[in-house]
Amino acid sequence: MVESTRLRRLVERVDSAIELCEETHLQGIKEVPPDVAVRARKVFTFARTAVRKTGNGEAMSAVDEALARRQVKITEVMDILWTIQEIVFDLMLPWRTELPEDVEIEGDELALGPAFWREFRLHP
């Protein structure tokens, strides 16, 4: 129970940091401003601790790998946060790792073209 609460808190912190990064990016800021860097570092420290406490060596290595990446641009920090989020989701929901990477649709439903989709328009 304690572990799942810790991981949920981590997801909340990651989500909040991603939101801050997205808002910053939408303002046209490319490099990580000091306030965002401080916030990200706090989330990264919490992530390292929370994942280490799960005892999952593979997840810890993945977090360390993500945190070793360059963190100059806001998009780079967002990528790291998204990676951490994926790692945590895999820890919280282990069955996710058993899902296939790509799901292929049987047949050519997507290749039917625009004429096919006109059949479903709302107004005649």
Image (spheres, rainbow, N blue to C red):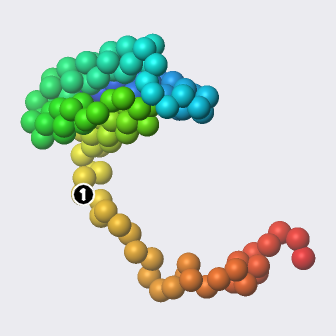
On the picture, is 45 further left or further right than 104?
Answer: left
Q: Position of residue 34 (x, y in %)?
A: 43, 14
Is residue 82 visible in the rendered image? The answer is no
Q: Position of residue 2 (x, y in %)?
A: 25, 20
From the viewer's side, name the closer residue of 26 and 117.
Answer: 26
Residue 90 picture quarter: top left
From the viewer's side, name the closer residue of 80 and 27.
Answer: 27
Q: State the residue position of label 1.
A: 98
Q: Position of residue 45 (x, y in %)?
A: 25, 18
| Label 1 element class | helix
Q: Quadrant of the N terminus?
A: top left
Residue lying at 44% horizontally and 82% vertically, measured from the top left: 106
Residue lying at 12% horizontally and 41% vertically, measured from the top left: 58
From the viewer's side, name the closer residue of 49 and 37.
Answer: 37
Residue type marked 1? Glu
Q: Position of residue 95 (x, y in %)?
A: 26, 51
